Image: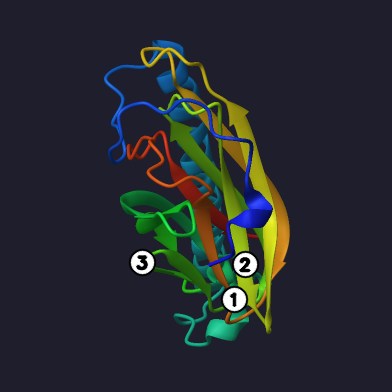
Amino acid sequence: MPASSPFLLAPKGPQGDPGGPVREPALSVALWLSWGAALGALACAMALLVQQTELQSLRREVSRLQRGGGPSQKADEYPWQRPWEQRSVLHLVPINITSKEDSDVTEVMWQPALQRGRGLEAQGYVVRVWDSGFYLLYSQVLFHDVTFTMGQVVSREGQGRQETLFRCVCSMPSDPDRAYNSCYSAGVFHLHQGDTLSVTIPRARAKFSLSPHGTFLGFVKL
């Protein structure tokens, strides 16, 4: 994991009661609907692409059979299918966290909520890349913490180096009843086979939502 010192966000403000992640009691209806609609749109778009590809395959097969041929036995008769078959999608949600006091960071453990293809694999606190290529990478953490600023760092380790892909910083209200804020980042990156990626919050004992609609990490191969 990357050292915490390069990613310190700001001097710590007053802390609330120490403890693990807080599952928020309630958020505004607008917040739930906005992120729910975004995730729903992404899932629908991927489903439509798959359905369109399968429909085209069936139409071609029916047309060939009508011309008197038998069922196709060669997978390479439809090379146009291969890009979709090779497209990897991985959407992760948090299941646990680990707070490290010595390095002043909190790490997130992930599990798949949506997976297609074999180009990526969740392995506890990291995601391993098995298929090199360009990926859309997105990440969000919904914080419930009275610390002055909170944020996340998405890092990659591989090919003998470690680097930060992106980081997000947000201000937090001092009122515990209003101390909710989400930090979202996204970008396109060239990932290599063997790379491992992780999300780190550069605060020990960081408080944030473990709900799947509040905190998540995702990859789509382009």
Marks 2,3: beta carbons within 8 A: no
SS under mark 1: loop
Picture quadrant where residue 216 is located:
top left
The three-letter code of the residue at mark 3 reads Gly
Picture quadrant where residue 116 is located:
bottom left
Q: CA distance from mark 3 to mark 1?
A: 15 Å
Instruction: Name the residue located 26 percent from the left edge and 20 percent from the top edge.
Output: 25
Mark number for residue 98? Answer: none
Circle 3 crowding by C-alpha within 10 Å: few under 14, some 14–19, many from 20? some
Name the spot of residue 199 as percent of width and height, x first.
51, 55
Mark number for residue 195? Answer: 1
Instruction: Name the residue located 55 percent from the left edge and 65 percent from the top edge.
Output: 197
Question: On the picture, is 170 further left or further right than 103?
Answer: right
Instruction: Name the residue located 49 percent from the left edge and 50 percent from the top edge.
Output: 217
The three-letter code of the residue at mark 2 reads Arg
The three-letter code of the residue at mark 1 reads Asp
Q: Which residue is mark 2?
A: 156
Marks 1,2: beta carbons within 8 A: yes
Query: Is 130 above or below relative to 138?
Result: below
Mark number for residue 124? Answer: 3
SS under mark 2: strand
Query: Is 34 above or below relative to 60?
Result: above
Name the spot of residue 173 as percent of width and height, x first.
51, 16
Q: Nearer the viewer, residue 138 or 49?
A: 138
Image quarter (top left, top right, bottom left or bottom right) of the C terminus: bottom right
Q: Nearer the viewer, residue 81 or 97?
A: 97
Question: On the picture, is 96 further left or further right than 186?
Answer: left
Sequence order check, earlier mark of 2 and 3: 3
